Amino acid sequence: MKKTCKKLFSVVCCAAMFFNFGVYSFANELAQIEEYASERVLVSVGNAQGEPGTTVEVPVFITENPGQDTIGFYVEYDNSLSLDENATAKSFTSEIYNTAALDAVTVNTAKNPIMYSAAAVNGATSATGKVFSVFVRIPENAAVGSSYSINAYDANDTIGGCYIGTTRIPIEYENGTVTVIEPQKPVSPDECDVVVSVKEIKARPGSTVKVPVELTKNPGQSTIGFGVLYDEGLELDKNATVASLNEAKDVYNTSIGNVTINAAQNPVIYSSVSSNGDVSAVGTLFYMYLKVPENAADGTTYSVSPVAVEESIGGCFSNTDELSLGFESGCIIVDGNTKNSGDIDGDGIINRKDLMLVTKFFAGMNVQIDMINADVNGDGVVNRLDLLLISKYFAGIIKSF
C-alpha cells in the first residue's frame, strides 16, 4: 500500500512539474508575443513632384523597425501613372537587407500593386532606410496642381506580413503622392556653364547607329552626371554602349578617373569624377549604339536627348562650385539613301569586321556587302581602289574617307 502511494505521489509530482513548465513556456511565449505586438514596423512612401510627361522617383522607406527578419507588402500606384518596371524592379537597396550577404529581396512589378518582399538569412535586422523606389511617368496632359496617390498596404497572408521567427509584427503605413508642378522655362544651353550635346544623324532602316554624346562647352569641372533618354522605338546595344568608355577618352582618362555608364535603364546614366582636379577638355564622353527598326519609314525621327537626373547622381561641379548644366538634344532621322562609307556590313559600326568582309568580297568569296558604303571614294564604282582606301583607314594612314 505504501509503495503504491509513493508511486502515485511521484506521478502526481511529475505531472505537476510538466504542467508548471508548460504553463511557464506558454506564459513566456505569450509575453513575447505581447512584447512584439506593442511594437510596429512603419512603412513610409515618400512624395515626389514632377512636370507633365516626366518620370519621377518615389522612394519607399522602413522608418520604424523594432527588429524583423521577414517582410512583405504591396505598393499600389494610381492607374493614370505609367510604371517603369525595369527601373523599379532593380531599385532595391542594401540599406536594410544586404543582397550581397545572400538576403533575399524581390520587387515584383508584373502587376499593380507592386509586391515587395525580403528575408534576412543572418538573423533579424532593426535597420531603417530606403528599401526600393517606384519610378512612374506623369501623363503628358496632367493638370498642374493635380496629384496621384502611391499607397502601401498589407499583402495577403501567403506572401505578406512581417515576422521575427514565427511571431508576427504589425505593419503600419504612411502613403505618398506625386504632385504635378508647372513646367519650368527651358534654359538655353548658351546660358549654362557646361553643355552636353547629341547631334542629328541620318541612318538607314535596320542599321545600328553610333551616336556620340559630347561635352561641347566646359570651363573646367571635376564631376558630372546626367542621363540620355532615347526613343522607345530604338533598341540599345547595352554592352557596346558601356564598352564605348574604352574608345572615348577625349575628356576623361578612364584609367585614372572614375567613369561609369548604367545602360540598364532609359535614360542611360553617365557619371564621371576626375582624379586630377578640374578638367576643361571638350569632346566625346561616350557612344550610344542604337538600332533603327527594320520597318522604319523614311523621314521617321527618333529622339536622343541628354537630360538632368536626380540630384544624388546628377549635376556638375568644379572643385569649388556647382556649375549649371545645359543640354542640346539630337535625333536619328531615317533615310534609306544614307551612306556610311566603310560600313561594309551595314550594321552602323565601322570596325575590322568590315575590312575582313570587303577583303573576302574581292577575293571572290560568296559574301554580301553594302555596295553604297563600300564605294568609299564616291566614284560610283566598287573596285580595288576602295579596298586600298579601306586598308589605309584601318592601318591609320588616313583618318576618314
Image (spheres, rainbow, N blue to C red):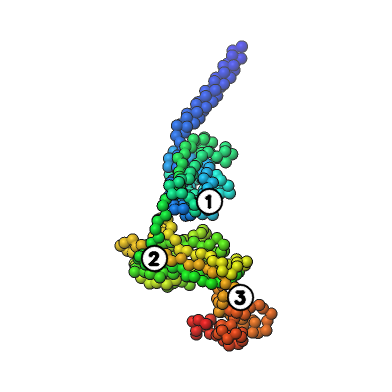
Q: Give the spatial CA distance, label 1 vs label 2.
A: 30 Å
Q: Is residue 197 above or below residue 142?
A: below
Q: Quadrant of residue 220?
A: bottom left
Residue, far bottom: 385
Q: How many marks?
A: 3
- Res 147 visible: yes
Looking at the rendered structure, the kind of residue marked 2 is: Pro
Measured as percent of width and height from the top left, residue 59 is found at 45, 48
Task: Give coordinates of residue 65: x percent, y percent.
Answer: 44, 40
Q: Secondary structure at mark 2?
A: helix
The residue under label 3 is: 345
Task: Give the mark nearer the N terminus: 2 vs 3.
Answer: 2
Give me the C-alpha separation between circle 1 and circle 3.
Answer: 38 Å
Q: Residue at x 65, y 84 (%)?
A: 363
Which mark's residue is nearer the viewer, 1 or 3? 1
Q: Residue at point 59% right, 16% down? A: 8
Q: Are marks 2 and 3 in contact (CB under 8 Å)?
A: no
- Across and down, in percent, residue 263 comes to 51, 61
Q: Is residue 96 above or below residue 252?
A: above
Of tags 2 and 3, which is closer to the observer? 2
The residue singled out by tag 2 in the image is 189
Q: From the viewer's perspective, tell me whether residue 295 is left or right of residue 399.
A: right
How crowded pointer 1 is (Cα within 10 Å; few <14, some 14-19, many 20+) is rated as: some
- Badge 1 marks a residue whose secondary structure is strand
Q: Residue at the right extreme?
A: 366
Query: Label 1, on which residue?
Result: 82
Q: Residue at x 38, y 62 (%)?
A: 187
Q: Position of residue 36 (x, y in %)?
A: 47, 33
Is residue 50 shown left or right of residue 366? left
Is the residue marked by circle 3 packed among few (<14), some (14-19), or many (20+) residues within 10 Å? many
User: Which residue is at 66% across, 77% downward?
Assistant: 368
How far is the residue under mark 2 from the one under mark 3? 37 Å
